[in-house]
Image: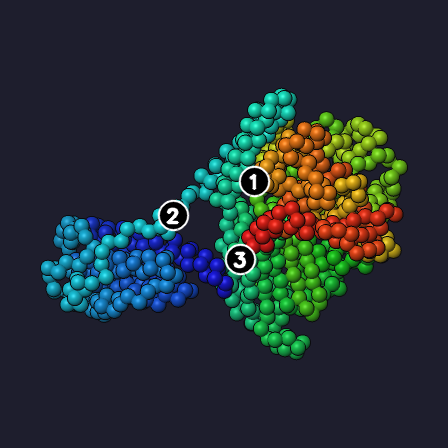
Amino acid sequence: MELNEIDDDIEAFLVESYENLNHIERDIIELEKASEQGEALVRIYRSLHTLKGNCGFLPFPNLESLAHAGENLLSCLRDRQLAITPDIISILLQTVDSIRQILSQIQATKDEGDRDYSPLLVALTELSETKQTPKVSQSHEPIVNTQTPQIDAQAPKDTAGSESVESLNHELTEISTPTTSESAYIRVNVNLLDQMMNLVGELVLARNQVIGFSTKFKDNGFAATCQHLSLLTAQLQEGVMKTRLQPISSIWQKLPRVTRDLAIASGKEVEVEMEGADTELDKSIIETIKDPLTHLVRNCIDHGIELPAERVACGKPSLGRLFLRAFHESGKVNIEIGDDGRGLNLERLKGRAQQLGLVSAVQAATMSESEAMNLIFLSGFSTAEQVTHLSGRGVGMDIVKSNIEKINGTVEIHSQQGQGTTFKIKIPLTLAIIPALIVSNGGNYYAIPQASLLELVRLEAFNSIEILYDVPVYRLRGNFVPLVYLNQVLQQDSLSNLETLSLVIVQVDNYRFGLVLDTIEDIQDIVVKPLGRQLKALSLFAGATILGDGTVALIIDVVGLANQTGITAKKQLLSENAANSQEQGGDRQTILLFEGPQGARMGIPLAIAFRLEEILASAVEKVVNQDVFQSYGQILPLIDLHKIFSDSDRFNDEALATVAETLQIIIVSPYSELSVGLVVDRILDIVEEPLTIKGIPSRPGVLFCAVIQGQITEILDIETVIRIANPHLLQLATHG
């Protein structure tokens, strides 16, 4: 375990321990006030038991011994083997003070120290071993004066162990004050966090409206105020969203016990490996994926991992392996759950699906590998011949897929017979406020979540559209992309402009298609509002949002759109055709082409280009020596390629007045922690073709030269470009 992981565990342990200790102290005080102490005794016992159990995962033997000794004494009191006396109250309070002192030492040094607590342990042990008949109190008056938790040297010595108690009077016992760990955390009701999130959402909507007004007025002061409001709103939004984030370990921590119970019940041997347990998600998503993840774990153990004898016969170790991984990538959370078991038997899956009447013999015969694997997600599908408490009733895997898709996530299966199966899940970080592309069609506005977007294309004429397997397709850099006309799906009038149309390329699982519509408006953060009960049955829409001018826009559910239009059913035929086309073209790469200094043709891999923007030259600001601009709530560094390749600074005070009114910016993200804006002269094209290296790098900042579209093109080395511009940016990205 790494040091930072140990520190996180200790911090979490301290927070919970201080909270438990405060409850214990309050309940001890209640013991001498109440005529019936049963409930308080049970609460103290449980809190000490929890504290002792948590110590078992960390190297704190002294603290564990104290908690254990206190637990034993509480057990005797709870079972009425001992009567509550002043000495017992005092020694319990001293135990609380000693535990708090150890926690304070752990917080300061990550170690419990070498202080001797043996006299206190002896006193607690002797009291526990003396099981006397309880004396019933005839009064409801307090047993002792509780103004101090220290042991009273003048107390009666008729209780067993009083000599040991008295000997402690001169020790380790001042009252501790709350420490930083104890006072730095509070627990907040989730409903309050939900209310705050709703208010932030309304603030984002108001921010969008104000920014919309600012474009109508040529007032520099008003524009600057709007930019400041936008920045503050984005920072507040980020802060509130962070309060809702929880590590995935909050649900993973229960899975080892589930695995153990299932393995024992099925006669198998299974070990669990976890990676990325500190990956954080929004609490609402955590709650949604809890059951699907448990279903997947059950499936891996029940259907995936073999019995020990079967594994040994196949040359595998008898101990099966179940692994769970989580990590952030491209603004999403990736979760992988898999095993090293027998894998999926595709012929058996297809045969079972026919037996259950889910597919026909013709469908099974023409089915691809991926389609055969996805049979396990069909409603009612199960490979179990008999229903048991492990196999279930065939209602698990379809629920897994539907629950994940409800939160705009996807699930894929990767399996190799004899080697194992892996389920790969991709889900958004949060569902409340997301970046989205705003589009218009037939006079109405719609939003497409940015997580589903791949590319935007402008169609100049319909003669570039072909028909393949009864599906309209567009040949995009040699590959066929199936098209969906939004006006046809929504049963609207014909497209308003027949000469120039917008094509939005979106992703569904590992498959892409194009959405043909009228106009692409803008990308902005939107607040997701749930649909009313009358519209919830519409699979085309995932919700609604309110735009800056007060207009309501429906949020398109890309998965539902693909399913309703039949694209999903024919994707295999189209994919095979695209694969054949790609094989004929050789090793192809997708490159974003643009014009750089002195009219040079330059390019970068499209994979690192996050988005394209146009900004006003007046929006460029300077922080120390770094040019920056504000974009969607972020302050992004700006790199002018003229400054890199021609030693001219277009943003100095003298030149700023001559800069064109708008600048074309490419937002690139070479690392997940770093995004910068490249200022280019003009965006040229996006191409996909083999890269033929024609020469060594022409100058610093160029990776190599290639012939693209018959012209020599410099492919930039983005890391070197950033290093030339500001090496500090790379240090921040690589060192966190």
Number of the label disc, if any, that sits on residue 624: 1
Q: Residue at x 49, y 54 (%)?
A: 250
Camera-side mark, 2 or 3: 2
Work out how far the residue at label 2 is from the one at label 3, CA to CA, in angstroms: 24 Å
Type of amino acid under label 3 = Ala
Query: Along the polypeptide, which appears first: circle 3 or circle 1?
Result: 3
Q: Quadrant of residue 299?
A: bottom right
- Given contact means CB atoms under 8 Å apart, are the residues at marks 2 and 1 in contact? no
Residue that label 3 marks: 277
Q: Position of residue 163 (x, y in %)?
A: 15, 67
**Regarding mark 3 in the picture, which secondary structure is present there?**
loop
Q: Position of residue 650 (x, y in %)?
A: 68, 36
Residue that label 2 marks: 184
* Residue 113 visible, this orientation: yes
Give the camera-side residue of 264 and 232.
Answer: 232
Up-down relation of residue 317 to residue 409 (above or below): below
Type of amino acid under label 2 = Ala
Give the camera-side residue of 122 and 49.
Answer: 122
Up-down relation of residue 64 to residue 316 (above or below): above
Query: Along the polypeptide, which appears first: circle 2 or circle 3?
Result: 2
* Residue 35 visible, this orientation: no
Up-down relation of residue 196 to residue 313 (above or below): above
**Regarding mark 1 in the picture, which secondary structure is present there?**
loop
Q: Residue at x 64, y 75 (%)?
A: 316
**For this view, does 713 lie left or right of residue 278?**
right
Type of amino acid under label 1 = Val
